[in-house]
Image (spheres, grey):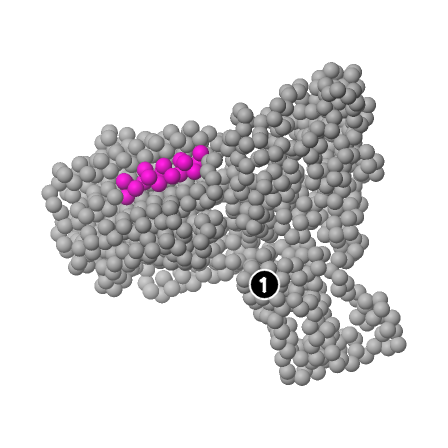
């Protein structure tokens, strides 16, 4: 194969580069589109916390945008080259196909972002039409050309192009929603299988037959073309079996198709290995492609394992996202960047010296970049702390931005040198740097790994722990004297079951070395932290870790450091036996008081006291009479109208868990765990019969979940806790009306709700009349922790709350009142979110002529009775609405008529004009 990707003979020698011919200008222009999509991908990665559907957008900006454009552009170039028709891949038809493709991609992405399915449909049709036209053009090109040695490459491109419209159709159907049972998961797996392994995978496999030896500067291996020709039917058969199994069979019956496809790739890759043995990779391009193929092999093995180990497609759907980063970033992105780093200098042309100079520019510091990319990506897919994963994700983003900067600078420099070469007296381009020597390559790899290690160390240091620890040696007795080591080791296994350590205490002879094996059989992430500072890693369900405590000379307390878990009873004790405590006659009283003889109190209950846990509590700053800052605006309590007609629609929403510091009263700030950055979370509204499709994305630092009371379904799957960086989809159909609570159900549930993880779903009763104004108020109480900190877990456990609020901020509607006109009908939906306190909603000066509570009318306007109501009384997690008309202008306070709670912040005003 040749450096300009046209083939001459089996030798693979290179003819002249294309230089800055019209073909070069064409490629520079159309590949700018690829760069724009890569830049968009980088921008989304930087701002994903603020974007809806951020994870979906990241994947599709890369795969639908950058990769699909690159495939259409370069498969056309390769096809024209191997068929010896180099001018065939340019002109108005090719440009029109690219315009159609990009309009379709923008339509698909825009339609998903703004939840307009018809836009997604139009966009999907445009994408399918563009790729179908590309396939038709490839077939016509083959008919025009004479038979060639590598014409089978074009058959790969035709097969890939024929598969993409099928995958796009599955995607459009999924975007429509309203799918029952496990059909969404089946369609998603089929969609990803076709698009990744068909559209992208077949294109890559066909291209590497000739591109790989060209990157290595070696001959195409004997038999490569025969292997490529023989393998294509095998790859298609495997894909077909996998997709059919996915759509119509249980997961284990889809696995053989994946295995067959993987086996076909192994056969196709054998010549590539021979070529690499003949001439080892020495460039970023070659090593990046090789690393990408390694990620593909690992991902296929894991995918087959996932399919073989479960009979539930819902379970498969929950596990498949684990492969997104390895496939998208590890395989596809690395192959794309490697190919661009090789092809762009060839397209720029200008002679051998200019090509070498451009290549050297793009490969600057490539060993370090390659090491950083793959090491960081490996850590991202391993069960590491979320802060480490964030640090590694930042490194990956920086590596992409670095490549884009190099690419732009290389192109600009190449064009400038080309213009300079045509001007007399302008010096020629500087000679390229010599190829990196082995010791420089190893040094670059070492540098890259060192950068990743620093990121890991920084991320680990930033990992949030729920309680501070004063380190203290374990080998001292109660008087602080070192105990004599016995030379023996006591080894114990501690098992985590639910929210308990079993056993919860161990007896250890004084002077023995203690080694603890921690086995997590629970459903959440846990660790074990001792008062000495010794701790295990945070381990996921099913994992184990070993803690070497060292020589033990005194009793030790331990607990799980995940926030709130200690208060839930996850405490552990090491009891030393046979020790000479050296205590005096006060020992008995020390034992009775719970001290260790040194004046340190140990609370083995795990509950603690509110005073102990709060420290500098934000409660000290809470003044119910305080005024907010000038320009204060309260949360908008107006309720949007329900969308659609009479129900049976599909309501899609992405809820992103975010940690956000908010002012919850004038001068009082708390670090809240939120849905979409607000507490309460967004209000959702629909009608009986509507289907809700909620995507939960965890961008927090600990595990979270969501439980929608508005849906009736088994909690095992959709309500499970997901780790930071993970997501799940929760689907339910609203079958009963009312205002329903949703909240995080991760233990301790009380703390997660108290710290902001709750919201409301309103399902309109059939025939609900229109009113002039409609508001929603969610009451909750605050257990204030430190200023700027999270809720006080001990206070939550003791039900010792400091403040009560409507819609997340105390007294906010005193300072920015709700409004109405005299005589207007006003409906007020109220939810008591708790977690522990009831509500008695009352409007001072008003009377309710309609009361709807927990799915039924207590009082209804126009009924046979002329009665009314003064209070909507609600237990925690219950809700309803009231309606009234204000008789005249004035200010009408609204409160919870538990008056102490009203005086703690559950107070507001209706300003009636």
Establish if 294 lies above or below 629.
Answer: below
Which image quarter is the C terminus in? top right
Establish if 246 lies above or below 107.
Answer: below
Q: Residues within 10 Å of mark 1 (few under 14, many from 20)?
A: many
Q: Is residue 171 magenta?
A: yes
Query: In the image shown, does 8 or 588 lie closer to the viewer?
Result: 588
- Residue at left 24%, top 38%? 135
- Residue at left 53%, top 40%? 731
Q: Is residue 728 magenta?
A: no
Query: In the image shown, does 283 or 436 lie closer to the viewer?
Result: 283
Residue farthest to the left, as pictured: 146
Establish if 541 lies above or below 407.
Answer: below
**Where, by quadrant of the figure, is residue 812 drawn?**
top right
**Where, by quadrant of the figure, is residue 19 drawn?**
top left
Query: In the image shown, does 91 or 115 lie closer to the viewer?
Result: 115
Does the image show residue 396? Answer: no
Residue farthest to the right, as pictured: 585
Q: How many marks?
A: 1
Q: Which residues, given as a range, are shown in magenta? A: 160-176
Residue 377 pos. (x, y %): 44, 55
- Residue at left 66%, top 64%? 501
Q: Which residue is mark 1?
A: 520
Residue 741 pos. (x, y %): 65, 39
User: Is residue 27 shown left or right of residue 746?
Assistant: left
Residue 98 pos. (x, y %): 30, 33
Residue farthest to the front, as pictured: 864
Q: Main secondary structure of the magenta part?
A: helix
């Amino acid at each position: 194969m040749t450096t300009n990707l046209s083939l001459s003979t089996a030798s693979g020698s290179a003819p002249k580069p294309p230089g800055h011919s019209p073909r070069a200008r064409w490629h520079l222009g159309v590949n700018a589109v690829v760069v724009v999509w890569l830049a968009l991908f980088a921008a989304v990665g930087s701002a994903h916390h603020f974007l809806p559907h951020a994870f979906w957008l990241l994947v599709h900006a890369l795969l639908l945008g950058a990769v699909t454009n690159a495939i259409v552009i370069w498969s056309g170039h390769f096809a024209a080259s191997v068929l010896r028709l180099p001018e065939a891949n340019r002109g108005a038809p090719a440009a029109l196909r690219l315009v159609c493709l990009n309009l379709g991609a923008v339509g698909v992405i825009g339609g998903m972002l703004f939840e307009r399915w018809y836009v997604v449909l139009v966009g999907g049709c445009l994408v399918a039409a563009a790729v179908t036209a590309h396939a038709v053009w490839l077939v016509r090109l083959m008919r025009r050309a004479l038979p060639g040695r590598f014409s089978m490459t074009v058959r790969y491109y035709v097969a890939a192009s024929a598969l993409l419209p099928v995958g796009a159709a599955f995607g459009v159907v999924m975007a429509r929603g309203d799918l029952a049972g496990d059909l969404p998961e089946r369609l998603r797996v089929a969609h990803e299988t076709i698009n990744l392994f068909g559209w992208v995978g077949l294109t890559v496999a066909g291209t590497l037959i000739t591109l790989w030896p060209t990157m290595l500067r070696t001959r195409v291996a004997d038999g490569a073309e025969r292997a490529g020709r023989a393998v294509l039917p095998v790859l298609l058969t495997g894909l077909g079996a996998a997709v059919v199994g996915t759509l119509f069979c249980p997961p284990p019956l889809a696995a053989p198709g994946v295995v067959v496809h993987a086996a076909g790739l192994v056969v196709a890759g054998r010549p590539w290995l021979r070529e690499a043995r003949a001439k080892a990779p020495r460039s970023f391009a070659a090593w990046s492609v090789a690393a990408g193929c390694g990620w593909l092999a690992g991902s296929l093995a894991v995918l087959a394992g996932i399919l073989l180990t479960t009979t539930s497609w819902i379970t498969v759907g929950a596990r498949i996202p684990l492969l997104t980063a390895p496939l998208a970033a590890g395989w596809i992105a690395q192959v794309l960047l490697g190919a661009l780093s090789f092809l762009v200098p060839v397209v720029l042309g200008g002679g051998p010296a200019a090509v070498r100079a451009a290549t050297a520019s793009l490969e600057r510091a490539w060993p370090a970049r390659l090491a950083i990319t793959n090491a960081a990506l490996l850590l991202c897919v391993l069960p590491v702390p979320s802060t480490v994963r964030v640090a590694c994700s930042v490194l990956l983003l920086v590596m992409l931005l670095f490549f884009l900067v190099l690419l732009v600078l290389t192109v600009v420099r190449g064009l400038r040198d080309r213009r300079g070469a045509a001007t007399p007296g302008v010096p020629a381009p500087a000679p390229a740097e010599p190829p990196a020597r082995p010791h420089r390559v190893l040094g670059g790899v070492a540098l890259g790994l060192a950068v990743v290690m620093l990121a890991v160390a920084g991320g680990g240091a930033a990992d949030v722990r729920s309680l501070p620890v004063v380190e203290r040696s374990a080998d001292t007795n109660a008087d602080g004297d070192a105990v004599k080591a016995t030379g023996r080791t006591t080894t114990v296994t501690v098992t985590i079951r639910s929210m308990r350590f079993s056993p919860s205490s161990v007896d250890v002879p004084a002077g023995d070395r203690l080694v603890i094996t921690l086995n997590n059989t629970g459903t959440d992430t846990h660790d074990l932290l001792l008062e000495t500072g010794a701790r295990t890693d945070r381990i996921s369900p099913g994992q184990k870790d070993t803690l070497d405590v060292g020589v033990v000379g005194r009793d030790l307390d331990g607990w799980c450091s995940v926030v709130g878990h200690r208060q839930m009873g996850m405490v552990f004790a090491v009891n030393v036996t046979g020790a000479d405590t050296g205590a005096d006659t006060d020992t008995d009283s020390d034992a009775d008081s719970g001290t260790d003889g040194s004046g340190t109190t140990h609370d083995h209950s795990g509950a603690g006291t509110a005073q102990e846990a709060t420290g500098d509590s934000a409660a000290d700053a809470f003044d119910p009479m305080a005024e907010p800052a000038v320009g204060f605006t309260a949360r908008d309590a107006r309720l949007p109208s329900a969308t659609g007609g009479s129900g049976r629609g599909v309501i899609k929403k992405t809820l992103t868990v975010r940690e956000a510091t908010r002012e919850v009263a004038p001068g009082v700030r708390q670090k809240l765990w939120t849905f979409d950055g607000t507490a309460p979370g967004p209000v959702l509204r629909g009608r009986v019969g509507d289907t809700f499709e909620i995507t939960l994305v965890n961008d927090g630092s600990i595990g979270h979940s969501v439980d929608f009371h508005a849906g009736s379904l088994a909690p095992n799957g959709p309500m499970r806790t997901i780790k930071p960086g993970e997501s799940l989809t929760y689907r339910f159909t609203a079958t009963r009306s009312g205002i329903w609570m949703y909240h995080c159900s991760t233990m301790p549930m009380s703390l997660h709700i108290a710290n902001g993880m709750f919201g409301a779903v309103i399902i309109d009763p059939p025939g609900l009349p229109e009113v002039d104004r409609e508001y929603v108020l969610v009451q909750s109480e605050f257990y204030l922790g430190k200023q700027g900190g999270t809720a006080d877990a001990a206070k939550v456990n003791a039900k010792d709350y400091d403040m009560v609020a409507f819609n997340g901020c105390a007294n906010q509607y005193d300072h920015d009142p709700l409004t109405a006109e005299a005589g207007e009908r006003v409906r007020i939906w109220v939810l008591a979110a708790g977690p522990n306190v009831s509500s008695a909603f009352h409007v001072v000066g008003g009377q309710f002529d309609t009361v709807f509570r927990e799915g039924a009318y207590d009082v209804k306007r126009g009924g046979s009775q002329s009665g009314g109501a003064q209070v909507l009384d609600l237990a925690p997690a219950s809700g309803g609405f009231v309606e009234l008309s204000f008789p005249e202008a004035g200010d009408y306070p609204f409160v919870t008529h538990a008056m102490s709670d009203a005086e703690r912040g559950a107070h507001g005003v209706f300003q009636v004009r």
